[in-house]
Image (cartoon, grey):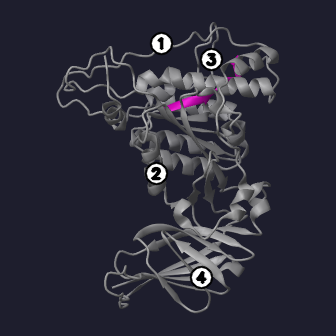
């Protein structure tokens, strides 16, 4: 049956739900290659991984590139809602398979919860897969008693009461198998994530290989790591038919012979698995992949990029920095290592500034305790102790401040009526924002 791409794009952007009581028409599920026997040796695991890997044009994450940020906020997005909208637009922009991969560090509960909050605001993904849950897979003769698939499915329906035994089993397996969550004290985060997913109507999936299926491999070795990534990619493709949007019964003659639309998933894995030589290699050569490296939100004594950058970079609010030319996006979260301080206040009764004819209304006034270049939304200006006016769109807008010695990124709430007063203090890694409204 012939299709035009424009119609397929409309289907992918959001299939209409049936308007009557007739059951929806399913897609014809794609043929799935046989999984075969699970590799038992490191050499066999490496051989299978090499066979299934496909090249990609992604680049490795380089946090030090943040030091070259310019006073240009066009690549910055602030706020969970705006970030979610950005990635929904990316997923809907083309009709091929699409995977949004968050790479996190296992010592940070905040990174995991922030990524989940963004995904649960999205509309385009068919589901959210996390490395912290285990997928059974379809290996020949492979028993997976530690898999979470069945219980996650029982908990997926927001219209049904919470299946307490299933939740207990999920929590029990987390306590037994998720060593990082136990060590860093965030086991309870996954109970919350399951509840939030139910509220958002977002199916959850496992993306790790159960430990009993890789018990014969060298722990932490190249073969085990690659096989876990192969297992995750295969499991996602196996899960896709269960969550693919169905035809509406009023879709003018579409039948169950129509091919299933290309899959769309959000995925959360450890930072190393999100690199170009990690999970992206096994998602297929036709897949579109955006990697989001999450930084910040870590314990104060954590060593890493945040500590290396702290002397020259301050983060005051969650901000997404879009990558270029295959480089990953970077989601920056404030913490005690590289975080800056923000003092926010409100004032009422101020007179709104005026502007010339046919010019945007200036609605942000900026000062700085040292010479700096300040960018907010689509505007930028050189600032010092003398107040400078700029115009910015109303809303939660990302900013970047660049001085010879330090860069600061964060967000300013620009009011629809009135104006915002921004007092920058890069030397002390701080700013004050006063929102003046009539």
**Image location (x, y in percent) of residue 63:** 72, 55
Real-space Cα distance between discs 4 and 1? 59 Å
Label 3: few (<14), some or many (≥20) within 10 Å?
A: some
Q: Please tell me which of labels 3 and 1 falls first in the chain.
A: 1
Please give the count of numbered marks on the rendered protein: 4
Q: Residue at x 72, y 21 (%)?
A: 50
Q: Is residue 297 above or below residue 401?
A: above
Q: Secondary structure at mark 1?
A: loop
Q: Residue at x 37, y 79 (%)?
A: 360
Q: Which residue, given by chain and number where applicable, does mark 4 sit on?
A: 382
Whether residue 371 sits left or right of residue 100 in the image: it is: right
Q: Which residue, given by chain and number where applicable, does mark 2 sit on?
A: 86
Label 2: few (<14), some or many (≥20) within 10 Å?
A: few
Q: In this rendered view, identify the residue nearer to me: 152 or 83.
A: 83
Q: Nearer the viewer, mark 3 or mark 4?
A: 4
Q: Which residues are magenta?
A: 204-213
Q: Is residue 13 above or below residue 86?
A: above
Q: Secondary structure at mark 2?
A: helix
Q: Please tell me which of labels 4 and 1 falls first in the chain.
A: 1
Real-space Cα distance between discs 2 and 3? 37 Å
Q: Which residue, given by chain and number where applicable, does mark 3 sit on?
A: 144
Are circles 1 and 2 on residues that touch, CB within 8 Å?
A: no
Q: Which residue, given by chain and number where applicable, does mark 1 sit on?
A: 31
Real-space Cα distance between discs 1 and 2? 32 Å
Label 1: few (<14), some or many (≥20) within 10 Å?
A: few
Q: Nearer the viewer, mark 4 or mark 2?
A: 4
**Image location (x, y in percent) of residue 325:** 62, 48
**Image location (x, y in percent) of residue 99:** 53, 36
**Image location (x, y in percent) of residue 432:** 56, 81
Real-space Cα distance between discs 3 and 4? 60 Å
Q: Secondary structure at mark 3?
A: loop
């Amino acid at each position: 049956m012939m299709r035009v791409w424009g119609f397929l794009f409309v289907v992918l952007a959001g299939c209409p739900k049936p308007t009557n009581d007739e059951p929806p028409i399913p897609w014809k599920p794609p043929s799935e290659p046989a999984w075969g026997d699970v590799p038992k040796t490191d050499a066999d695991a490496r051989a299978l991984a090499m066979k299934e890997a496909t090249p990609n044009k992604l680049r490795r994450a380089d946090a030090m590139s943040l030091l070259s940020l310019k006073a240009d906020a066009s690549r910055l997005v602030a706020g969970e809602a705006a970030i979610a909208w950005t990635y929904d637009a990316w997923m809907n922009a083309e009709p091929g398979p699409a995977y949004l991969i968050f790479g996190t560090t296992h010592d940070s509960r905040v990174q995991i919860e922030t990524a989940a909050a963004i995904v649960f605001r999205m509309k385009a993904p068919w589901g959210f897969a996390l490395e912290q849950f285990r997928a059974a897979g379809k290996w020949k003769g492979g028993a997976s008693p530690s898999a979470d698939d069945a219980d996650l499915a029982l908990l997926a329906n927001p219209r049904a009461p919470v299946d307490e035994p299933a939740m207990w089993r999920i929590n029990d397996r987390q306590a037994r198998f998720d060593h990082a969550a136990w060590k860093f004290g965030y086991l309870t985060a996954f109970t919350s994530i399951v509840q939030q997913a139910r509220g958002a109507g977002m199916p959850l999936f496992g993306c790790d290989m159960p430990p009993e299926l890789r018990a014969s491999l060298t722990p932490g070795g190249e073969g085990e790591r690659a096989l876990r990534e192969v297992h995750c990619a295969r499991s996602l493709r196996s899960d896709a038919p269960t969550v693919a949007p169905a035809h509406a019964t009023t879709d003018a003659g579409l039948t169950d012979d129509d091919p299933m639309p290309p899959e769309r998933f959000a995925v959360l894995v450890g930072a190393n698995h999100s690199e170009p030589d990690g999970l992206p290699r096994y998602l297929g050569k036709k897949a579109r992949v955006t990697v989001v490296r999450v930084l910040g939100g870590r314990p104060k004594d954590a060593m890493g990029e945040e500590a290396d950058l702290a002397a020259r970079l301050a983060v005051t609010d969650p901000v997404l920095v879009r990558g270029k030319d295959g480089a990953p996006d970077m989601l920056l979260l404030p913490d005690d290592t590289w975080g800056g301080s923000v003092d926010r206040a409100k004032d009422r009764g101020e007179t709104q500034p005026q502007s010339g004819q046919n010019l945007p209304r200036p609605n942000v006034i900026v000062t700085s305790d040292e010479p700096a270049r300040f960018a907010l939304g689509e505007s930028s200006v050189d600032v010092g102790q003398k107040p400078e006016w700029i115009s910015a769109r109303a809303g939660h807008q990302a900013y970047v401040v660049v001085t010879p010695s330090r860069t600061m990124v964060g967000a300013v709430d620009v009011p629809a009526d009135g104006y915002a007063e921004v007092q920058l203090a890069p030397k002390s890694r701080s700013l004050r924002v006063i929102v003046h409204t009539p």
